[in-house]
Image: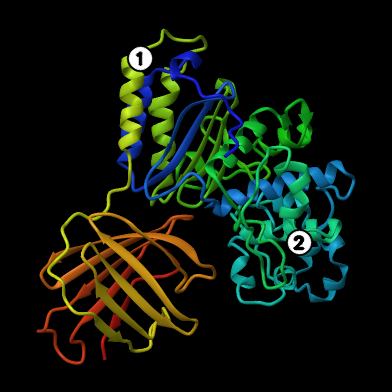
Amino acid sequence: MMNAFLKVTPESVGISSRSLLKMMKDLGRLEYLNSIILLRHGRVCLECWLEPYRREVPHQLFSLSKSFTSCAIGLAQAEGRLRITDKLISFFPEYEEKITDPRMKKVTLEDLLTMRSGHKVCATRYMTGRPDCICAFLASPLDTEPGTYFAYNSGASYMLAAVIRRVTGENVREYLLPRLFEPLQISPGIWECCPAGINLGGLGLYLTTDDLAKFAQLILQHGRWGGRQILPADYLKAALMKQADNSMNENPDWKTGYGYHFWVSRHGCRGDGASGQLAVILEEHDVCIAVTACLTRMQDLLDIFWEDLLPDLKDAPLPEDPAAHRELLDHIGTMKIPALSGSAAEPRPAVRFHFQDNSAGIRQCEISFGPDHCAMTFLTSRGYEQLRAGFGHFEYSVLQLTDILPHPVAASAAWLDPSTLEIRSFICDGIYRDVWTVDFSPGNPEPLKNQMICTCFRPEKPRFLLAEQ
C-alpha cells in the first residue's frame, strides 16, 4: 500500500509518547474506536487499526462525505462552471412548476453548503423512496426564509451533488478523480447513489483511513499537495470558517459554527460523519487526525483529543524516550475489539428456525455448529446468506440481509448459559453492529418454542424478534 507520510517518533514532532499512551488507553475504553492516524508536521507519529477492522478495507464515511462534495463545489466554481451565489433552481429549470413554496426559488448553493436551505428538518424525509429526489427536494415545503436558520440536512448535500452532475456531466466521485483523488494517490471506494444514479452527496463514500489522513493533510495545507494547488485556497478558507450559527445544538463541538460542509470545533475544524468518522484539522498546531469508529457518543472522542493531546503539544522536538515509545507501540499492538469469551459447547445438531413475517424479511435460519464456531444460514428473498461466528475469536463473512449492499462482517459467539447463545457481529467497513440472542430453552410457551432476537446498533433498524413457528 502506498504510504504518503514518513513515520517518526512522537518526540521528534514535539509530542510525548506517554501522553499518547494515555490518549490511546482512553480511546480504547470507548465503544468502539476502529482506527486512527495522527499526523504532525506532515508525518505519522501514531497509527492503529483495531481488530476486526483492517487497514486495507475502505470504511463508510457517512456525513464526512459532505466535505468531499463541498470540495467539488469549490473546484467547479474555480473552473467557472457555477457560483455559490447561484440559485439552485437555475440548474433545474424544468422543475420550476413543481415548486410548492415560492421561497424555494431563493435558495442558493451557499444556503445548501451552510445547511440553511429553509428547512428545519432534514429534507431526506421528503426524498426517501422517491424515484426523482431532485423533484422531491424542490417540491418540499420550507419552514423559514433560506439563509436564516441552520438545520443539518443531507438532502441539501444531495442537491449539491446533483448540481455537480448537471454542470459537469459526471458524478462527484468521477469529477474528483483527476482533480483530488488521483493527485493524492487515492483509489476511492464506491459512493452510493440515488435511484437515478446520482451520488448521494451527503453520505455514501468509502475511503481507507490512510486516504482520510491524506485528505486532512491537504486541507491543513490550504489545498496544496506536492507543489500543486489541488483545491482553491480562497474557497477552502471560507469553507473552514463559521458561516452559519449552530449554537442551538447541545454538544460543545457541534455549536461553535458551521462552514461549507465543514464543522468549526472548539479547536480547529473537521469533516465529520456519524458515529466517529473524522478528519480533524488543527492548523494552529500543524496536526491532523483521521479516525474511523462506531461510537454511540462522538463528543467523547473529541473530548479525549482536547484533554489528552492538546495540552502536551510542544513547538520544538522533545528528547527521545525509547522506553515510553516502546510501551506505546506495545499497547497499540494489543488494542483490539474483544471477541466474546467462552468455549464452544458440546457439539449439537443443527437447528432450523422458520419465521413469521418480520421487519428483516428473513424467512428461515439454520444454526449449525463446528468445533470452534457456529454458523447462521439465512434464507431471504435474495436467497441464502451465511454468518459465521467464532467461539472466543472472530470469523469473517460477507453479509447483506437488510442492507442495500453486502458488507464484510466479523462475528464471535458464546453460550451465556446452556440454553442461550449470543452472537455479536461487526460490519467491518462501517459503523453497524448487531447482537443476536438465541434461546434454545425447551420450556418456552407455544407457539414460541425457541426465540431468536436481534438487537441492532442502527437507529433506523430497531430491535426485532424472530421466532420459530
Task: From the top left corner, tell me how far across and down residue 208 is, in percent.
Answer: 55, 46
Identify the residue at horizontal 84%, vertical 60% (top origin). 169
Q: Amino acid at mark 2?
A: Ala
**Residue at (34%, 48%) from the top-left corner?**
31
Q: Is residue 83 left or right of residue 469?
A: right
| Amino acid type at mark 1 | Pro
**Coordinates of residue 221 in the picture (x, y in percent):** 68, 27
Task: Tell me how far mark 1 sits from mark 2, CA to CA.
Answer: 52 Å
Quarter of the figure with residue 419: bottom left
Q: Secondary structure at mark 1?
A: helix
* Label 1–label 2 contact, CB within 8 A: no
Residue most toward the right?
A: 80
Position of 7 compared to 391: left or right?
A: right
| In-front residue for pair 313/400 | 400
- First in residue order: circle 1 vs circle 2: 2
Q: Residue at x 33, y 89 (%)?
A: 356
- The residue pinned by badge 1 equals 322
Which of 27 and 98 lies nearest the eye of the viewer?
Answer: 27
- Residue 22 lies in what quarter of the image? top left
46 vs 443: above or below: above
Question: Which element carries disc 2, helix, strand or loop?
Answer: helix
Can residue 138 be seen from the camera position used here? yes
Q: For residue 162, which numbered disc appears in the image? A: 2
Residue 35: percent from the left, percent from the top? 44, 42
Q: Quadrant of the N terminus?
A: top right
Q: Is residue 118 visible?
A: no
